[in-house]
Image: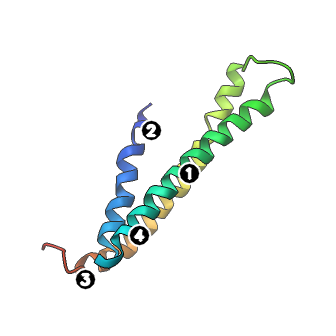
Amino acid sequence: MIVAGAGSPIGLVGFDFAGIATPPAQVGTAMALVNITGYAATIAVIFEIGLVLDLLTPPGSSHYSAHAFSLAMLVPYPVWLVTGVQIWLCTRRVPGAITACPTHAP
């Protein structure tokens, strides 16, 4: 639950980067891309969790085992890892954009 609860603040980092590192005329487009990619990633993870549950459940059965749930709940971790790496890579590029941004307050 602690890791899942970090999703909202991490998602806001994307909006912060999009707002700071984008020219003012393109901020709306950048925010829309952050919103759409976050939604698409969420839907993809939910689909993959369901796929893992279906693959690990015997045909004709509607009962998912605890083992199937344990493995299915591992699906978000690679997505979170990729997201963390991307945020880390962006933080290396954004500081220059922050100081060049005309709306940046020192």
Secondary structure beneath dot 1 equals helix
Q: How far apart are marks 3 and 2 (CA)?
A: 34 Å
| Side of 23 where 30 appears, left or right | right
Q: Nearer the viewer, mark 3 or mark 2?
A: 3
Residue 72 position, x and y percent, is: 66, 34
Observer-nearest of 26 and 82: 26
Label 2: few (<14), some or many (≥20) within 10 Å? few
Q: Looking at the image, tell me whether mark 4 or mark 3 is earlier in sequence order.
A: 4
Q: How far apart are marks 4 and 3 (CA)?
A: 19 Å
Q: Looking at the image, tell me whether mark 4 or mark 1 is earlier in sequence order.
A: 4
Rendered residue at 39%/59% (across/down): 14
Q: Nearer the viewer, mark 4 or mark 3?
A: 4
Task: Answer whether labels 1 and 2 touch (C-beta < 8 Å).
Answer: no
Q: How far apart are marks 4 and 1 (CA)?
A: 18 Å
Residue 79 position, x and y percent, is: 57, 51
Label 1: few (<14), some or many (≥20) within 10 Å? few
Quadrant of the snapshot with the C terminus: bottom left
Q: How far apart are marks 2 and 4 (CA)?
A: 29 Å
Residue 29 is tagged as: 4
Q: Is residue 86 above or below residue 39?
A: below
Q: Looking at the image, tell me whether mark 1 or mark 3 is earlier in sequence order.
A: 1
Residue where numbered disc 1 is placed: 41
Rendered residue at 79%/29% (across/down): 56
Kindly indicate the quadrant of the structure image that contains residue 24. bottom left
Residue where numbered disc 3 is placed: 100
Which residue is most to the right?
59
Quadrant of the snapshot with the N terminus: top left
Regarding residue 23, the answer to whether it shows in the image is no
Rendered residue at 72%/19% (across/down): 65
Residue 52 position, x and y percent, is: 73, 36
Residue 5 position, x and y percent, is: 40, 37
